[in-house]
Amino acid sequence: MLNFALVAAILTLFFGAGFYLNKKHPLAGCLNYPIAFAVTVALIGYLYYLSLLFVVSYDFLLICIILIPASFLIPSLLREKGLAFSLPKCRGAGNMLILAIGILILTLRFNKQLHRWGDWDAWAIWTLHAKFLFYPEYWSNMFTNKLSGSHPDYPLMLPSLIAFMWRGVGFVTPIVPMIVASLVCVAVPVTLFLALNRFDRRFSAIFSVFVLALDAKFINIAGSQYADTLVAFFILVTFVLYREVKNGSGPTVVFLLGFIAGSTTWVKNEGLLFFLVFSCAFIFFHYRRPETAIRYLAGGLAPVLILMHFKVAFAPENDLINSGRGSDILSMIVNPARYMLIAKHVFVTSINYYWILLVLLAGLVIQRTSFLTTLPFIVFALMLSGYFVIYLTTPNDLDWHLGASLDRLLHHIYPACLYLALLRLSSNSGGRLNMPDYQV
Amino acid sequence: MKLLKIAIVLVLSSLCFSVLNKYRKLTLPKSYTEVDSLDIMLADAKMKLPANSTIGFRTNAPVGRQDVLYFKSALVLAPIVVGRGENDTMLLIQDHQFPALPLDQYECIHNGGGKYLNYSLVRIKE
């Protein structure tokens, strides 16, 4: 019975968010559904955590999740007399076929990577945290320094999502983290495709899907069942929404932009850096439109408050911040060998795994497209600077730290960079390197 | 147009089939990983310990493998907190390939084992 209620809750939340977005922002069409997926994931992540915090029973949580969106959906259905009112038509069945083929290739390759309990960080961090959250009476056992190697200070979106589904299923099973990883892995190229297709960049849309479907590194990280692809998805959706805001969408989308950008903080600590940088840049770019900035901040308020409460009330000290290396920092900063090592790792990782972005960046330079003063470029530049500072002052062995995480940090911004670069490359009608426009 | 729609349905059907087939295979015992074998091995230990307890962990495995066994045991036993090092109650995991840990200082509560590993749930002697 609880299984059905779980499925009903997830579907009601997803379609409720999708229908609401279609009503508020009909121009986005099919693109509203990946955004609705992000909203669903974020809301489940928050609501499950809050239900543990306020000792709300799981059954009651499911009822609320079903009833609140349903109270919006049912009157709309009755008013519009049928389901056709808000299922948007995607442009061209040919496009959809190509997208489906791309997703099939991606899924077949992804399935080869998939194994029970995932890779190291999946069972040592994310699924372990989810296992604690599965027990409503004992979930706070996790917040102890005895488990410091498992980083109990990490945000809880992915563990909450997994634990929420385990509770619905009734037992702990490795299938749930695998399903979550599969959905997130598929959501990234689908979002990219629909976001580019929305502006009639059909060739770029198809190109982006096949880049990801054939990218072994992307699939490898997505299949590891870590939270990195979820961060990448939220960062991508943030930039997709930012493009919608730039395109003149309504206040709801601005609020949603704040909510999704804020929700990256609930996925991984790196999301906090992204949210800080993106928010500063967004406010700087919109200081002449205070109502837009206020709506954005209002959207980001709830995620930030939840994160702050978690960090203050529960999370043990972070190993990078509280490693007691105060006097060593100066010697780390003035050591040229550390700079060389970081540069070497960045060069090797970029060339090996993210060369497509370098090619697109070269395309932008050749096209003489001005992108240096755009918000996305500033955000990515500041994020990479932040990562650089963290590596430079890391208390861990630098070579090990870079080898263990640099590819995943670049993975966070990879889909968003792909989206923005392709959008930019294919939008300059007067440019010298125009992408051909695919016609169905 | 109709052909395109049929093609989309075919592609999506094969997508669903490949996903379901993969998940079916992953539920079979031949897909089990070390976490699953530890889960089976430690099933009795879980019953002996209260859910809000904290236990220590030691193993005779070499350094690189100690972390693997520690985190996998922590996952299997959660919400029991498994900390590294000594505690009143300890989980000792012994790999048959390596010299056994001395148990003189401990009083055994429960033990069991599998093909490659065995475990002892012990209490430090008064």
Image (cartoon, rainbow, N blue to C red):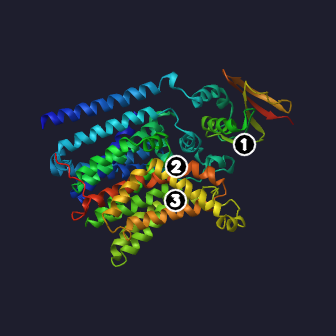
Work out whether residue A323 can be spotted: yes
- A111 on left or right of A348: left
Q: The disc numbered 1 marks a residue on which chain?
A: B
Residue in the image at 34% along x and 40% along y: A8
Task: Quote the CA–CA distance across marks 1 and 2.
Answer: 27 Å
Other-residue count near label 1 (Cα within 10 Å), few / some / many at <14 / 14–19 / ≥20: many
Front of the two marks 2 and 3: 3
Give the residue drawn at x 27%, y 46%. A206
| Disc on the earlier residue, 2 or 3 | 2
Q: What residue lies at 46% left-to-right and 60% top-to-bottom? A: A303
- Name the residue tied to disc 1: B84
Residue A6 position by quadrant: top left
Cα separation between marks 3 and 1: 28 Å
Q: Specify the amino acid type for callout 1.
A: Arg
Q: Residue A120 at x, y = what percent?
A: 57, 40
Q: Tag 2: residue type? A: Leu
Q: Which dot, 3 or 1, sits closer to the camera? A: 1
Label 3 marks a residue whose chain is A
Please rate how many residues cluster around mark 3, counting C-alpha atoms within 10 Å: few if below 14, some from 14 to 19, many from 20: many
Mark 3, secondary structure of its residue: helix
Q: Position of residue A53 (x, y in %)?
A: 53, 52
Residue located beneath label 3 in the image: A307
